[in-house]
Amino acid sequence: MNMIIERSSRAPAAADAQIARVLLKSAEEKLASAPEKRLKPRPAEELLHELEVHQIELEMQNEQLRQSQIDLEASRDRYVDFYDFAPVGYLTLSHNGMIDEINLTCAALLGVERSNLQSRPFAHFVATEDRDRWHRDFLAALKGDTPLSLELMLQHGGGSRFNAQLDCLRLKQDGKGFVMRIVLTDITERKMKEEVLRRSEEGFRSIFEQAGVGVAIIESATGKFLRANKKYADIVGLTKEELLSSSFSEITHPEDLQSDWAYMEKLKSGQISEFSLEKRYIHKNGSIVWVSLTESPLWYDGRELKQHMAIVNDITGRKNFEEDILRSNVELEQFSYAISHDLRQPLRM
């Protein structure tokens, strides 16, 4: 950078001298080719005045040129700073894959001094397992104008590895033919987060599918099943595919729909955080299935509830037992009433 600043301070004087030489040569050539003119004698004072005016005019033009040169140098310095210290790596590869230009950020990512990267094959920094793919994609990108974006495992100069995304664009450069401009971004952190999310998703899927109760994700606005485990489908006698092509209102007993939707409206408006109730489903064979249902919000888009989770447990056996007990109690009460009524009647001899 010191070299750049020093060159910037010398450049205006050198440029001015060069411009003056070019203007002088151009003026001499123009004078030599101009037709001869017979000039009328003019007073020396008038000629001297014109020369002074012309001199001032040239000095003003020279000052404008000098200021333009200073502005150009400042603009170039800003570009150099932006290029070298950008948050992503920039590099240019020649048509044979050699590093032609590279910024400081990219050199730091590769772990090598920038001065030691010039004319080195970029493929040396690509992990062995990705090297063939890099050569294939690089050669294909050189043959067309379509931008190329790919992810590669790169090798740091110190031996460590990192995930990188390369956004490549072929350009025509004077004197060098086609070159490849590349924006290189370290995506190691993003890939780690994706891996954690993937493992989390796999764990959730395993728990979801193997749960001993029915679990489903439902679109709140329509009641359509978006995802469900096999246990949920078994409760109503459907396959998972059949369940996912229906909504909860289609399998709910008509007499229970009104209260079900009333609870859903409270859930969507935020009046309650979840709700539990006992309700009836209609089995595929037409029989009644009693379930214990708990529904809770899963995803809000702003204030609008988009999806919720439903957990159901088949309680038909318990409800049938309760009904049997109730029926037995009724029958026992009727029997007791009949016995007591008969006992109050007088005996007939």
Image (spheres, helix red, strand yellow):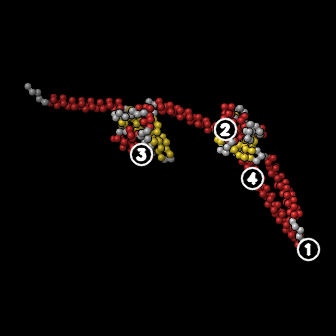
Q: Give the residue type that dot 4 points to.
A: Ser
Residue 313 seen anywhere in this rendered image of the structure: no
In-front residue for pair 142/336 = 142
Q: Give the residue type that dot 1 points to.
A: Pro
Q: Secondary structure at mark 3?
A: helix
Q: Residue at x 85, y 68 (%)?
A: 53
Q: CA distance from mark 1 to mark 4?
A: 50 Å
* C-beta proximity under 8 Å, tags 3 and 4: no
Quadrant in the picture for residue 338: top left
Front of the two marks 1 and 4: 1
Q: Earlier in the sequence, mark 2 or mark 4?
A: 4
- Where residue 265 is drawn, which disc sits there? 3
Could you tell me which quadrant the C terminus lies in?
Answer: top left
Q: Earlier in the sequence, mark 2 or mark 1?
A: 1
Q: Give the residue type that dot 2 points to.
A: Asp
Find disc 4 in the rendering and name its residue. 75
* C-beta proximity under 8 Å, tags 3 and 2: no
Percent across and percent down for residue 117 are: 76, 38
Estimate how packed mark 3 is, as few (under 14), some (14 to 19) or many (20 or more) residues with alpha carbons within 10 Å.
some
Find disc 1 in the rendering and name its residue. 41
Q: Secondary structure at mark 1?
A: loop
* C-beta proximity under 8 Å, tags 3 and 1: no
Estimate how packed mark 4 is, as few (under 14), some (14 to 19) or many (20 or more) residues with alpha carbons within 10 Å.
few
Front of the two marks 3 and 4: 4
Q: Secondary structure at mark 4?
A: helix
Q: Earlier in the sequence, mark 1 or mark 4?
A: 1
Q: Residue at x 15, y 30 (%)?
A: 344
Q: Earlier in the sequence, mark 3 or mark 4?
A: 4
In-front residue for pair 169/341 = 169
Q: Give the residue type that dot 3 points to.
A: Glu
Percent across and percent down for residue 121 are: 74, 36
